[in-house]
Image (cartoon, rainbow, N blue to C red):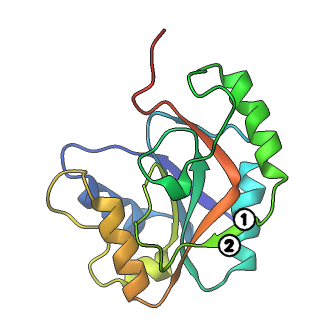
Amino acid sequence: MKIFTTNAYSDGNYGKWMNEVMKASPCEWVMFHDHDIYLANRNWYKIVSDAIEANPDGGLFTCVTNRIGNAYQKVKIPDKRNNDIKYHMQMAEQIELREPKIIDLTNCPKKISGLMMVTSKTAWAKTLSGFREKGGYVGVDNCYHGAIKNAGYKIYLMNNLYVYHWYRGSTK
C-alpha cells in the first residue's frame, strides 16, 4: 500500500491546500501532519497500513500523542515536559504493544485533533465538500471529521501509533 505523506502547509487557507493535495495525490491514501510532530515510532508506516487494511470502513485515521487538547488522543507518559526525541521513541515502542490497537472514534463527543490525519481519496470525494475552505486553519480537522462521518465512514484512532507533538512545548 502506498500512502502519500505531506507536511501541513498553508498560505492562510489550510482547507483549500488540503483539497488541492487530495486532487493531486498519486496515491489513494494521504497522510497530513503538522509541522511540529515527529513520527516517533519507526514502524509507523506498517501500523498505518495495517489499520487501513483491517478497517475497510475507515475514512479517517489518527494517532495518539503527548500534547493535545483532545483527551481521546492524549496518552500519559512519565515525563510530560521531556522534549528529547530519543525518549519519545522509547515511549512509542512501549505504546505500540498495547491493546486495543484500533479504537472507533466515529461517535465520540469530541472530534479529532488533526495533528496527523490519514484519509482516502474515495472517502474525501464522498464528503462532497472535502476540507472546509473558510476560516484559516482552525476547525478544518473537526469539520472534516463530521463530513467523513456524514459520508458513512468510520473514524479510527490508532491507539498503538504514538506521535511526539511539540505543541506549545518548552524550548528549555
Amino acid bearing label 1: Ser
Q: Left of 90 or right of it: where is 76?
A: left
Residue under circle 1? Answer: 49
Q: Which residue is drawn at 26% across and 78% down?
A: 129
Q: Which residue is drawn at 55% across and 48% down?
A: 74
Q: In this view, does 145 lie above or below 158?
A: below
Q: Left of 61 or right of it: where is 151?
A: left
SS at badge 1: helix
Q: Is residue 119 above or below residue 14?
A: below
Residue 65 position in % (x across, y down): 58, 44
Can see residue 138? yes
Tag 1–tag 2 contact (CB < 8 Å): yes
Q: Extreme bottom residue here?
A: 152
Q: Residue at x 50, y 38 (%)?
A: 67
SS at badge 2: helix
Q: Dividing the picture into quarters, in which one does residue 110 lie?
A: bottom left
Q: In this view, does 136 lie above or below 106?
A: above
Residue under circle 2? Answer: 52
